[in-house]
Image: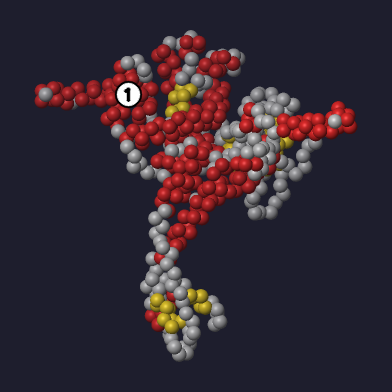
């Protein structure tokens, strides 16, 4: 009660009381979002206790547990494993292939000169990319490293890659790729108080990433040894060269570390896995028919039991003379002691509601992961139109992730390789190191992955023909979309094939037969 109300209350208490009640009622009048999602008076929302935080409280403080649970689901939950591998297969497939596309008009080249330059660069790049020498561990080539990096990013929320220069025999290029699991980038035991380090990521005054702090071994590794951190600057101080690639998908402003893609559905996937295991065990038990025989007299323990005639290992497991575990087995007949009884139970399996419940949960998981249910479980039973709509919706997401992977991983690696190739004069590019625009013109590239595929190839081809004939698309684009091939290479190959058929007289024979 304010001073005015107190003064009125002295001379007119009823008026003061009405003013106080009216003011209280005013506090309950909602406006805007307080009518809806921010309401504190609605019964449906009154018990909703939510607390917000910055990216540190909401993300950084929970990353360790999220990564561990995400990896555990990948190793033990079929739906989780299938979802991640479905993304990997459709986005990366056998690897995103380089198609050099330079800005030849800006560089003052003819179309033929540009085609020759691009062909030479693609040959040189394949020499490095298809060799195990591009990997610091000599385990994978560049295209397999793409798969591994993308899989790690999905599972852990992020993936790091160093680009060291290491000389190796019979390889003209020294650029190497060293993939690093997300756990190894973490806060040092002794932080520098003058630097802001967020979960191993050091940021500057404007929030820009300055460096990463890399542990010399995996923090969950169960081995002895001293932990040491190495500070790796993201860009070289003098050269400006990219030292560390950080693959992550940002969800919030000022977010520095990535979140596993399974994070929103971890609870659903774990509960679904438990339910499936319980139903599976119940079905197994239901399929076993065991007979218990009760004798009215005592049983001689020296004589073999009737159930042992089937299989002692399946029916009775003796741990000690006093501790005997009876286990169910198919067709087992187990003899009980005097006075013992066994009550038969019927688990009622198979559960008729199991499939419908699993389908419902999988649809929700698919929505969160942007994977249609049909593609998530690889089960296409709907009509052609429905199945095609599901695939088209999924491919919007696949293309988005492919473009992201190409921009954040493949293109930076290619540009680093091209710098080395030009510096060693294996690729001629005048002005490459003197003019940033010239370097950008030479570095243009397209990264092509697996094609979408067709449910009905005949209808897909007819639709592609109409798009090309009406000018809605090009033969190059349609070739890439339908088969993932290069239209120009196909034309050259077809010309050679037609020439060979002409020389062999095969075309003339076909004309005579017609």
Residue 353 rendering spot, x and y as whole percentages: 42, 53
The image shows residue 189 at horizontal and vertical percentages of 75, 44
**Horizontally, is 43 left or right of 362 in the view?**
right
Asked whether residue 133 appears in the rendered view, the answer is no
Q: Give the residue at x 43% y 64%.
A: 347
Crowdedness near tag 1: few (<14), some (14–19) or many (≥20) residues, C-alpha within 10 Å: many
Q: Nearer the viewer, residue 133 or 27?
A: 27
Q: Quadrant of residue 57?
A: top right
Q: Residue at x 40, y 41 (%)?
A: 374
Give the residue at the far left of this rendering: 513
Tell me which corner region of the image, top left, top right, bottom left or bottom right, holds residue 378. top left
Q: Is residue 52 visible?
A: yes
Residue 90 at x, y percent in the picture = 43, 36
Query: Viewed as shown, does residue 402 lie left or right of 509?
Result: right
Establish if 273 lies above or below 423: below
Which residue is most to the top? 108
* Residue at x-position 47% and y-position 72%: 327
Q: Is residue 328 above or below residue 58?
A: below
Q: Quadrant of the N terminus?
A: top right
What residue would you read off at disc 1? 464
Say which quarter of the image contains residue 363.
top left
Q: Residue at x 38, y 80 (%)?
A: 309
Q: Is residue 333 left or right of residue 503?
A: right
Q: The C terminus lies in which quarter of the figure?
A: top left
Secondary structure found at label 1: helix
């Amino acid at each position: 009660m304010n001073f005015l109300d107190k003064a009125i209350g002295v001379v007119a208490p009823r008026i003061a009381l009405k003013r106080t009640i009216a003011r209280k009622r005013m506090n309950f009048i909602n406006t805007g979002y307080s009518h809806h999602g921010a309401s504190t008076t609605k019964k449906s929302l009154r018990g909703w206790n939510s607390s917000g935080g910055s990216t540190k409280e909401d993300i950084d403080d929970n990353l360790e547990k999220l990564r561990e649970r995400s990896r555990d689901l990948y190793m033990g939950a079929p739906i989780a494993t299938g979802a991640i591998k479905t993304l990997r297969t459709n986005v990366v497939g056998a690897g995103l292939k380089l198609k050099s596309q330079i800005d030849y008009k800006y560089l003052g080249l003819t179309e033929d000169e540009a085609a020759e330059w691009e062909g030479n660069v693609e040959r040189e790049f394949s020499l490095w990319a298809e060799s195990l020498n591009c990997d610091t561990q000599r385990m994978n080539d560049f295209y397999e490293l793409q798969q591994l990096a993308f899989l790690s990013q999905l599972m852990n929320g992020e993936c790091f890659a160093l680009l060291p220069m290491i000389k190796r025999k019979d390889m003209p290029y020294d650029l190497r790729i060293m993939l690093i699991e997300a756990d190894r980038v973490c806060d040092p035991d002794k932080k520098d108080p003058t630097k802001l380090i967020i979960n191993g990521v050091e940021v500057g005054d404007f929030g820009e990433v300055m460096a990463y702090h890399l542990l010399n071994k995996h923090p969950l590794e169960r081995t002895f040894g001293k932990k040491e951190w190495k500070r790796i600057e993201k860009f070289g101080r003098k050269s400006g060269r990219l030292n560390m690639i950080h693959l992550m998908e940002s969800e919030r402003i000022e977010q520095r570390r990535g979140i596993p893609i399974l994070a929103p559905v971890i609870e659903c996937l774990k509960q679904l896995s438990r339910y499936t295991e319980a139903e599976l065990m119940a079905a197994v038990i239901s399929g076993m028919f065991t007979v218990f025989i009760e004798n009215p007299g005592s049983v001689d323990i020296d004589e073999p039991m009737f159930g042992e005639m089937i299989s002692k290992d399946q029916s009775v497991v003796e741990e000690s003379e006093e501790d005997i575990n009876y286990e169910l087995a198919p067709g087992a007949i187990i003899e009980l002691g005097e006075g013992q009884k066994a009550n038969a139970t019927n688990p009622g399996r198979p559960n008729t509601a199991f499939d419908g419940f699993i389908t419902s949960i999988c649809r929700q998981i698919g929505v969160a992961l942007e994977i249609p249910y049909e593609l998530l479980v690889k089960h296409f039973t709907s009509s052609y139109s429905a199945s095609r709509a599901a695939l088209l919706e999924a491919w919007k997401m696949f293309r988005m992730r492919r473009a992201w992977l190409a921009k954040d991983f493949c293109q930076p690696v290619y540009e680093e390789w091209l710098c080395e190739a030009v510096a060693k004069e294996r690729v001629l590019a005048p002005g490459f190191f003197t003019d940033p625009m010239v370097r950008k013109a030479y570095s243009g590239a397209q990264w092509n992955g697996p094609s979408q595929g067709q449910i009905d190839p005949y209808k897909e081809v007819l639709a592609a023909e109409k798009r090309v004939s009406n000018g809605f698309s090009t033969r190059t684009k349609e070739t890439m979309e339908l088969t993932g091939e290069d239209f120009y290479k196909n034309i050259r190959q077809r010309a050679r094939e037609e020439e060979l058929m002409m020389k062999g007289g095969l075309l003339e024979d076909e004309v005579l037969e017609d």
